[in-house]
Image (cartoon, rainbow, N blue to C red):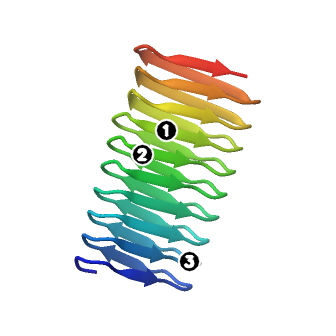
Amino acid sequence: MGNGRVSVYVSNGGVSVYVGNGDDSVYGGNGSDSVYVGNGGVSVYVGNGSDSVYMGNGSDSVHMDNGGDSVYVDNGGVSVYVGNGSDSVYVDNGGVSVYGGNGSDSVYVGNGGVSFYVGNGSDSVYVDNGGDSVYVGNGGDSFYVDNGGDSVYGGNCDVSVYLGNGSDSVYVD
């Protein structure tokens, strides 16, 4: 896809979509799909399957359904909604919100300004540089935090928190 306002609807199958700059929407069906997004306000809705989404710069939204999905986010303004399944989210620079569904999810974060809402399941969150907030659901969760300014809010669960340098807060119910 070139630059501009584009909508793409994908049915069942293994599909790769390359989206340039612009206000785009991509709707993926069931299958192993890959979506590569450039700069712009992009919405990606991924169905059931093992999907990969690569986000560039911009105010983007990624909605994942059931499956083992991977999301790679470069620079901020992104919301990621992860469905049920074992998902991985890789975030480089901040301004990102990650909403985890039920499942064993992994989130890897570079530079801060990230909010995590982790659902039910055994989740792992790896945070490098701070300014992050983590809200924990039910499950055996682990958090690895390097440089500070982070907050962790725990629900009814077994939580392991590893804190590095900085002013961190941990609230466990």
Mark 3 or 1, closer to the camera: 1
- Tell me the residue at 69%/51% (across/down): 102
Look at label 3 and name its amino acid. Answer: Gly
Q: Which mark is residue 96?
A: 2
Percent x, y of residue 98? 51, 47
* Residue situated in front as seen by the camera: 165 or 63: 63
Percent x, y of residue 55? 35, 59
Is 14 positioned to the left or the right of 172 in the image?
left
User: Can you say which quadrant of the picture contains the C terminus?
Assistant: top right
N-term-proximal mark, 2 vs 1: 2
Secondary structure at badge 1 equals strand
- What residue is shown with label 3? 31
Look at label 1 and name its amino acid. Answer: Ser
Q: In this picture, is 37 found above or below 17?
A: above
Badge 2 local density, few (<14 within 10 Å), some, or many (20+)? Answer: many
* Residue situated in front as seen by the camera: 104 or 151: 151
Query: Spatial distance from mark 3 to mark 2, Cα to Cα?
Result: 26 Å
- Tell me the residue at 33%/71% (across/down): 23
- Tell me the residue at 74%/37% (across/down): 138
C-beta proximity under 8 Å, tags 2 and 1:
yes
